[in-house]
Image (cartoon, grey):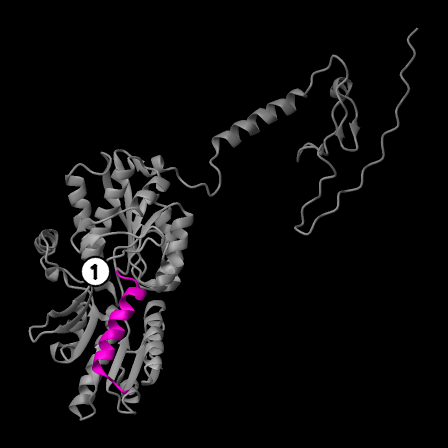
C-alpha cells in the first residue's frame, strides 16, 4: 500500500524587494531569478525535477534531473545570441570600418555659411584640391579618399553638435575646425570618437588635439609685439572680440605693452554689431598712437571703415589688424581706401610662397574655382597632404600608428614651406608669420616675414 505523500504547506509570500534611489528593485542575492520569471511558480512536473523555489532562487536540481529547465535554457540561448549580435553602445568604429568599398573617409569642419563663410569655403576648396591630387596618385594605401563636411558657422554653440554629426559618418580624420572657440567644443568630441584632427585653430589650449600646420598664438604674438615696439607708441587702444583666439591675442598684447609702460585702453566689442563708430570714437578718446584690432575680418572691416571716417575728420591713429583679419574679404568689405590705412599681422598669401608647390596650388585653385585663393585654403591643402603622408608612413589604418607618424613629420615640403611637427604638442615648429600691408590695387603686400 502506497502511503500518500504528506501535504506541504505553501511557503509564506516573500515581501516585495525594496527600491533603490533609482526606483529599481534591489536584488537580494546573486541567485535572484531573471526578470519575468521570478513571480511565476513552476508547475508540478518542473518542481519534481528541479525542486521548490527558495528564498534566493530555485533549489539545486535533484539527482538525475536536468541541470536547467528547458524553457529557461531556450531563453538563455536566445539572450546570448542577441547579445553577441548587438554592437556595444557607444563603441568606436574600428579603422577598417572607416575604410569600406575601397575608400577612406576624411571630414572637413568649418564656417561654410554665416559671416566667416569666405574663410570656410576657401579652406574646403583647399581640402578638395588636395584630395583630388591624392586620389589621382593612387589614394592612401590604395584607398580613395571620400570627403564629408560639417558646417559650424563659426559658432561655438554648434561646435559639439556639428562634431558629433561628423563623427557619426565614421571619418578616419578631420581637417578643422578653424575658429578656436569652436575648436574648444569640437576637438574633444573628435578625439573621444577616435577621429584624428588636423586642426586649423591657433589657440594654444587646442594643442595636443591632433596636429596643425598653421601658426599658434604663442608664435604669432611675438611678431605683433615686435612690430608694436618698432612704432614706439606711448598710448595704444585695443579693440577686441571676446572669442577665444582674439581675446587671447588681445590679452598677450596688453601684458606686453604694460611691461613697456605703454598707456593702454582695452575695449571689448560686440561681434554682432553692424556699426562700430561709437566704439572707435571711444578708442580714440585718449589720442592713441595706434589702435590694435584683435577681431575676425567681418568685424575688422567695419572697424577699419570707422577708423578711416574718424581720420578724415581729423582724429587719426595708426591701425594695426591682428592675424584673424587677414582675408581678401576684409579688403572687399572695408574698401581699399580703408584697408590700405592698416598694417596686418598674418601669413604670406598663396602667391607669396616662393616654391613650386605653392605656384601649382594657385594655378589649380584658380582653374578649378575661377578666383584667386584666399589666405587659409593653402593650409588645409597642406594638412591633407601631411595626413596622407603620415598614413602611408605608418603603413596601416591604425589611428595610433598614424598619430605617431604624424607627430614625427619632419621637413615635409608643403605649399606653405617645409613642415615639421613637434612631438610634444602636434604644433608646427617652423611657421610662416608675416607683417603685411594692402596695396592700392587691393592686394596684401608682404612687408616682413618671420619663420
Count every numbered label the image shows and give the total. 1
Quadrant in which the N terminus appears: top right
Q: Which residues are magenta?
A: 215-234
Specify whether residue 171 is in view: no
- Work out which residue is located at the far bottom of the displayed protein and give it: 314
* Residue 69 placement: quadrant: top right
Q: Is residue 193 magenta?
A: no
How would you classify the magenta stretch by its main secondary structure? helix
User: In which quadrant of the rendered view does residue 139 lie?
Assistant: top left
Depth check: give the residue in front, 313 or 63: 313
Location of residue 69 with respect to 328 vertically, above or below: above
Residue 439 in view: yes
Q: Is residue 319 left or right of residue 184?
A: left
Residue indicated by mark 1: 376
Side (left or right) of 313 relative to 215: left
Q: Residue at x 17, y 74 (%)?
A: 333
Image position of 38 with respect to 366: above or below: above
Residue 58 horizontal/vertical position (percent): 75, 27
Answer above or below: position of 176 versus 330: above
Where residue 270 appears, as percent x and y from the top left, is 34, 77
* Residue 330 screen position, x and y as percent: 19, 72
Q: Nearer the viewer, residue 406 or 33?
A: 406
Amino acid at each position: 500500500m502506497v502511503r500518500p505523500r504528506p501535504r506541504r504547506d505553501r511557503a509564506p509570500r516573500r515581501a516585495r524587494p525594496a527600491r533603490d534611489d533609482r526606483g529599481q528593485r534591489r536584488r537580494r542575492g546573486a541567485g535572484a531569478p531573471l526578470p519575468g520569471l521570478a513571480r511565476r511558480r513552476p508547475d508540478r512536473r518542473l518542481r519534481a525535477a528541479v525542486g521548490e523555489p527558495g528564498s534566493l532562487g530555485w533549489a539545486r536540481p535533484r539527482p538525475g534531473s536536468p541541470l536547467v529547465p528547458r524553457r529557461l535554457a531556450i531563453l538563455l540561448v536566445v539572450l546570448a545570441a542577441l547579445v553577441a549580435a548587438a554592437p556595444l553602445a557607444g563603441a568606436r568604429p574600428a579603422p577598417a570600418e572607416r575604410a569600406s568599398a575601397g575608400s577612406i573617409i576624411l571630414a572637413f569642419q568649418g564656417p561654410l555659411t554665416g559671416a566667416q563663410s569666405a574663410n570656410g569655403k576657401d579652406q574646403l576648396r583647399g581640402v578638395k584640391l588636395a584630395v583630388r591630387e591624392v586620389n589621382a596618385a593612387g589614394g592612401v594605401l590604395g584607398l580613395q579618399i571620400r570627403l564629408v563636411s560639417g558646417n559650424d558657422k563659426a559658432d561655438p554653440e554648434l561646435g559639439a553638435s556639428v562634431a558629433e554629426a561628423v563623427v557619426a559618418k565614421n571619418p578616419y580624420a578631420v581637417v578643422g575646425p578653424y575658429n578656436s572657440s569652436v575648436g574648444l567644443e569640437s576637438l574633444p568630441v573628435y578625439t573621444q570618437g577616435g577621429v584624428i584632427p588636423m586642426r586649423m585653430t591657433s589657440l594654444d589650449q587646442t594643442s595636443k588635439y591632433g596636429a596643425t600646420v598653421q601658426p599658434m598664438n604663442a608664435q604669432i604674438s611675438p611678431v605683433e609685439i615686435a612690430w608694436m615696439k618698432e612704432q614706439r607708441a606711448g598710448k595704444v587702444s585695443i579693440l577686441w572680440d571676446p572669442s577665444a583666439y582674439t581675446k587671447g591675442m588681445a590679452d598677450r598684447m596688453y601684458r606686453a605693452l604694460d611691461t613697456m609702460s605703454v598707456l593702454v585702453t582695452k575695449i571689448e566689442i560686440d561681434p554682432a554689431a553692424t556699426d562700430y563708430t561709437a566704439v572707435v570714437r571711444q578708442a580714440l578718446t585718449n589720442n592713441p598712437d595706434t589702435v590694435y584690432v584683435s577681431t575676425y575680418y567681418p568685424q575688422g572691416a567695419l572697424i577699419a571703415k570707422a577708423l578711416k571716417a574718424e581720420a578724415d575728420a581729423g582724429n587719426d591713429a595708426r591701425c594695426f589688424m591682428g592675424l584673424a583679419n587677414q582675408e581678401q574679404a576684409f579688403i572687399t568689405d572695408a574698401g581699399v581706401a580703408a584697408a590700405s590705412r592698416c598694417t596686418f599681422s598674418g601669413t604670406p598669401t598663396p602667391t607669396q610662397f616662393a616654391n613650386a608647390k605653392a605656384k601649382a596650388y594657385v594655378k589649380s585653385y584658380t582653374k578649378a574655382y575661377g578666383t584667386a585663393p584666399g589666405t587659409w585654403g593653402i593650409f588645409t591643402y597642406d594638412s591633407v597632404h601631411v595626413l596622407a603622408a603620415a598614413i602611408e608612413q605608418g603603413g596601416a589604418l591604425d589611428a595610433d600608428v598614424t598619430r605617431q607618424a604624424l607627430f614625427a613629420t619632419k621637413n615635409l615640403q608643403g605649399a606653405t614651406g617645409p613642415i615639421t611637427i613637434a612631438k610634444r604638442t602636434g604644433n608646427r615648429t617652423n611657421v610662416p608669420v608675416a607683417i603685411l600691408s594692402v596695396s592700392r590695387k587691393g592686394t596684401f603686400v608682404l612687408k616682413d616675414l618671420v619663420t
